[in-house]
């Protein structure tokens, strides 16, 4: 299964549309960090949150992901694993199930 990751900058529209694989970014106090909020690519409606770094993988106690900084062709590393549900990669703007 491959699903396009669509960026939605408007938080209200993001939540209203709930498009599978869509994502929204929330700023944090540190300008290099963001909350990457996404709807599960499988279409179940689950909304997840990931701590991402713009061009880096944040260090610390909370799990985090490297994000390439792109809203059109985002990449996340490592893979995204929703426990016992969906596990896959976000590569070049597409969600790919493992």
Image: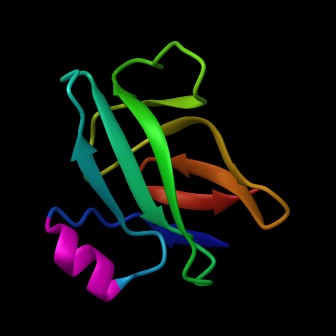
Where does the image place residue 15, in percent across and percent down from the top left?
Answer: 31, 78
Q: Is residue 36 left or right of residue 1?
A: left
Where does the image place residue 5, in percent across and percent down from the top left?
Answer: 41, 63
Where does the image place residue 30, in percent across and percent down from the top left?
Answer: 23, 21
On screen, residue 19 above or below 47: below
Where does the image place residue 60, in percent across and percent down from the top left?
Answer: 54, 14
Q: Which residue is nearer to you in this view: 81 or 27?
A: 27
Residue drawn at point x = 32 percent, y = 67 percent = 6
Residue drawn at point x = 58 percent, y = 27 percent = 62
- The kind of secondary structure the magenta stretch mainly shows is helix
Q: Is residue 8 left or right of residue 15?
A: left
Q: Is residue 85 magenta?
A: no
The stretch in magenta equals 10-17
On screen, residue 32 above or below 71: above
Q: Is residue 21 left or right of residue 13?
A: right
Quarter occupied by the N terminus:
bottom right
């Amino acid at each position: 299964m491959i699903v396009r990751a669509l960026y939605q900058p408007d938080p209200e529209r993001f939540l209203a549309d709930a498009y599978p694989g869509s994502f929204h970014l929330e700023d944090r106090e540190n300008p290099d960090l963001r909350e990457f909020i996404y709807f599960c690519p499988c279409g179940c409606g689950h909304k997840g949150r990931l701590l991402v770094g713009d061009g880096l993988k944040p260090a610390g106690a909370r799990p985090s992901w490297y994000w390439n900084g792109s809203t059109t062709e985002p990449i996340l590393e490592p893979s995204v694993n929703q426990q016992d549900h969906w596990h896959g990669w976000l590569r070049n703007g597409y969600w790919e199930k493992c």
